[in-house]
């Protein structure tokens, strides 16, 4: 079994160079008002409708204003206060020849406080008439915030429907680490991934992992192009040289896990046990990915045995040819790969369906709860298939010198958004789990892993909750243990540092499988 490498930091530099061209701002074409079903208002950041004076505002001065963010330490303006989206219905069309995306988003929302104004997070795009329960609303744009003022104040607990018509050329979102996300054009379409903040690059989202919702995504594309979304394909209809693919994810999904990747794909459907599969592969990647993709049902079965029943209705993969992207992502039910994945990359992204997609962080600095778990899943897969054991992998990494990438930032405290996908979050995060396994024993450890999943499936979590569960199951005080592993910078003092680098651990896998999120 080849040894995995961890070259995330180095790859990020390469990605940054690649996206300079791909991510260059493109001016949005002015919309045809007829297309948008109302009088168009335009502008990217400038306010398009001045807010009326306080005393005359709809709902009056007593109504509350939803916060522009949910106080995430890394992305304070992502997501919005006062709203809980129940369902997104996105009716979109995209033409790869012009790169133009247009359509209508319909959001069913519940107010979590009295609201005379609330925000959504679409970036760019020209908007048509935004309505709340069918009545035109006043809108203002302030940076990445779209402020919506309904005619009447919404009362806490009220359900309401917002319709946002929009059009334009989607502009990929460039992350703090220089990588690109959102709606990223490819040679034959677009690859669509959003971790952590790409969703507003293609639809008006409440862009926080805390607000999971169900989704219908209908995408109309030129004939010959396939659009692949989350969940189940509920219809595929062609007319007038265009095809509409309608996808439905009926399980809760965080906005960053949505996709509607499109291009030329060969599609294979089948079953993983009783779960329907849908695997879409760019023809250029078909030969290289076939041997790995054949193992997808076996991987799903393996992960179910280990962690608990698969959380969603469908499973699959989207293998694109997307050097513009430079990484794979665990989009819900169908992870997206920028190229033919290797075995461990596929296993990694599938394991995220349990840890990441079903059990999702509440705040981005807790990213090790996704990446440490997915990396450790690679280790246990390898261990159970005759390769290096997780204990051996741990011992190998433990020899890394103190100045290695491995130790900083500490996985529980990445420090800043640019470090979200640092190698230490993955590998030291996985070491934390393996150290826990060795400390409390297999029986308690696997109980922790299974209960963590069973008790938080479809919800959101934090590191202190994981620590509490591990302590409860093991009946041990693990405060100092987790502090040392997750929060203390540098190589833990209890691991010998003989200064000898372990170069062999670094170099093997990423050439074939690509960088993974
Ligand atoms: Zn990952």
Image (tube, rainbow, N blue to C red):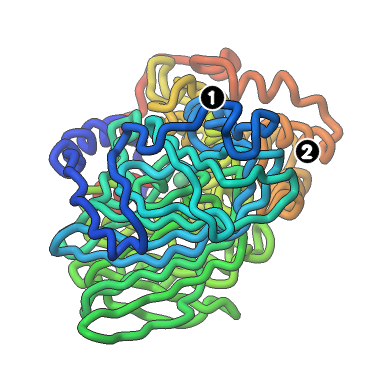
Q: Mark 1 points at which residue?
A: 73
Do we see residue 391 in this rendering? no
In the picture, the quarter occupied by the C terminus is top left
The 10 Å Cα crowd at callout 1, few under 14, some 14 to 19, many 20 or more, is: few
Q: Nearer the viewer, residue 56 or 378?
A: 56
Q: Nearer the viewer, residue 135 or 241?
A: 135
Q: Nearer the viewer, residue 191 or 515?
A: 191
Q: Quadrant of residue 261?
A: bottom left
**Residue 454: x and y, percent?**
74, 55
Q: Name the residue under label 2.
A: 469
Q: How many labels does the image show?
A: 2
Q: Residue, x 48% and y 26% (percent of image)?
A: 74
| Secondary element type, mark 1 | loop
Q: Residue, x 52% and y 45% (percent of image)?
A: 206
**Residue 515: x and y, percent?**
33, 45
**Residue 22: x and y, percent?**
17, 44
Identify the mark at residue 283; answer none if there is no mark: none
Q: Which of 22 and 474 is in front in this view?
A: 22
Farthest residue toward the front? 56
Residue at disc 1, CB closer than 8 Å to ligand 1: no
**Residue 257: x and y, percent?**
48, 53
Is residue 39 found left or right of 72 in the rendered image?
left
Q: How far apart are marks 1 and 2 (CA)?
A: 24 Å
Is residue 420 found left or right of 286 in the rendered image?
right
């Amino acid at each position: 079994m080849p040894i995995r490498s961890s070259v995330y930091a180095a790859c990020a530099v390469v990605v940054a160079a690649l996206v300079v061209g791909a991510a260059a701002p493109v001016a949005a074409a002015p919309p045809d008002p007829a297309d948008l079903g109302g009088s168009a208002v335009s502008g990217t950041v400038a306010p398009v409708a001045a807010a009326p004076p306080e005393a005359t505002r709809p709902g009056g001065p007593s109504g509350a204003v939803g916060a522009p963010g949910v106080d995430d330490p890394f992305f304070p303006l992502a997501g919005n206060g006062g709203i809980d989206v129940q369902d997104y219905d996105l009716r979109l069309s995209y033409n790869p020849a012009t790169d133009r995306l247009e359509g209508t988003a319909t959001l069913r929302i519940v107010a979590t406080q009295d609201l005379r104004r609330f925000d959504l997070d679409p970036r760019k795009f020209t908007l048509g008439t935004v309505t709340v329960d069918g009545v035109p609303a006043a809108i203002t744009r302030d940076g990445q915030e779209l402020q919506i003022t309904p005619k009447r104040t919404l009362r806490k607990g009220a359900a309401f429907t917002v319709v946002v018509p929009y059009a334009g050329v989607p502009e990929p979102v460039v992350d703090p680490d220089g990588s690109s996300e959102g709606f990223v054009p490819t040679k034959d379409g677009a690859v669509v991934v959003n971790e952590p903040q790409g969703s507003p690059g293609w639809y008006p989202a409440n862009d926080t992992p805390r607000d999971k919702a169900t989704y219908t995504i209908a995408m109309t594309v030129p004939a010959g192009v396939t659009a692949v979304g989350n969940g189940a394909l509920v219809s595929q209809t062609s007319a007038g040289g265009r095809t509409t693919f309608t996808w439905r994810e009926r399980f809760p999904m965080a906005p960053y896990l949505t996709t509607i990747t499109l291009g030329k794909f060969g599609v294979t459907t089948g079953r993983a046990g009783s779960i329907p599969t849908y695997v879409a592969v760019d023809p250029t990647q078909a030969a290289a990915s076939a041997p790995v993709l054949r193992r997808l049902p076996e991987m799903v079965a393996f992960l179910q045995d280990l962690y608990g029943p698969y959380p969603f209705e469908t499973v699959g993969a989207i293998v694109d040819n997307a050097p513009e992207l430079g990484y794979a992502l665990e989009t819900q039910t169908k992870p997206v790969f920028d190229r033919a994945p290797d075995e461990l990359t596929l296993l990694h992204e599938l394991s995220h369906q349990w840890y990441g997609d079903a059990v999702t962080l509440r705040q981005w600095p807790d990213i090790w709860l996704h990446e440490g778990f997915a990396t450790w899943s690679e280790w246990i897969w390898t261990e159970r298939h005759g390769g290096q054991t997780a204990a051996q992998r741990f011992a190998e990494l433990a020899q890394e010198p103190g100045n290695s990438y491995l130790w900083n930032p500490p996985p529980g405290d990445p420090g800043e958004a640019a470090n979200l996908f640092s190698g230490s979050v993955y590998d030291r995060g996985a070491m934390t789990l393996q150290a826990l396994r060795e400390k409390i024993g297999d029986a308690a450890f696997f109980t922790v892993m299974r209960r963590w999943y069973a008790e938080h499936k479809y919800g959101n979590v934090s590191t202190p909750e994981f620590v509490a569960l591990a302590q409860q199951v093991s009946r041990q005080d693990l405060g100092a243990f987790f502090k040392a592993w997750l929060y203390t910078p540098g190589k833990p003092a209890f691991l010998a540092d003989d200064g000898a680098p372990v170069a062999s651990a670094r170099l093997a896998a990423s050439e074939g499988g690509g960088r993974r999120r």
